[in-house]
Amino acid sequence: MKTITLEMPIVTKCIASECVYNANSSCHARAITIGDSIHPGCDTFLAGSRHTKSVNQIAGIGACKTVGCKFNNDLECIADSIQVGMVKNEANCMTFDLC
């Protein structure tokens, strides 16, 4: 497998404990995608009882489709880091801030 190294914001905390990528309140997906044009939901969220074993990697934000956020620049997140939490039973970017 070929690999690349990218600089991207990281997910510093995730309280979506029912997500398969969550272990110890941290997201361990390689990268997550946030939202649609209006809502800052975590599109990578996947509910399940089996959780990732790969706890050494910390998730980055690969793309952000929520264009109304002040941290969105050309459909990418420019915040230093984000936190993911639960809002009405949905995983959401808690760093989201309307511009």
Image (cartoon, grey):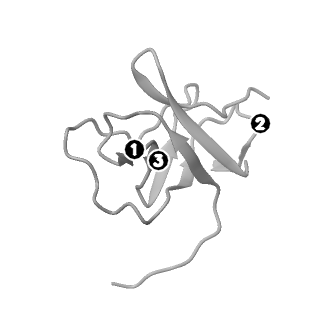
Disc on the earlier residue, 2 or 1: 1
Q: Of the residues shown, which amino acid type is indicated by label 1?
A: Thr
Residue density around tag 3, few if under 14, some if 14–19, many if 20 or more, within 10 Å: many
Q: Which mark is residue 25?
A: none
User: From the viewer's perspective, is 15 left or right of 77?
Assistant: left
Task: Tell which tag, 2 or 3, sits nearer the viewer.
Answer: 3
User: Please, what secondary structure does the residue beneath circle 1 have?
Assistant: loop
| Residue nearest the viewer, comparing 6 with 72 | 6
Direction bottom: furthest residue: 2
What is the quadrant of residue 24 in the picture? Answer: top left
The three-letter code of the residue at mark 3 reads: Ser
Q: Which residue is mark 1?
A: 44
Work out whether residue 25 or residue 9 is closer to the camera in this orientation and state it: 25
x 58%, y 25%: residue:
38
Query: Which residue carries the number 2 mark?
Result: 70
Nearer to the camera, 16 or 6: 16
Q: Which residue: 33% across, 63% down?
A: 54
Residue underneath mark 3: 26
Separation of marks 2 and 3 at Cα, in angstroms: 24 Å
Dots 2 and 1: beta carbons under 8 Å?
no
In the image, what residue type sits under mark 2?
A: Lys
Residue 23 higher or lower than 96, as above or below: below
Query: Is residue 40 visible to the viewer in this orientation of the structure?
Result: yes
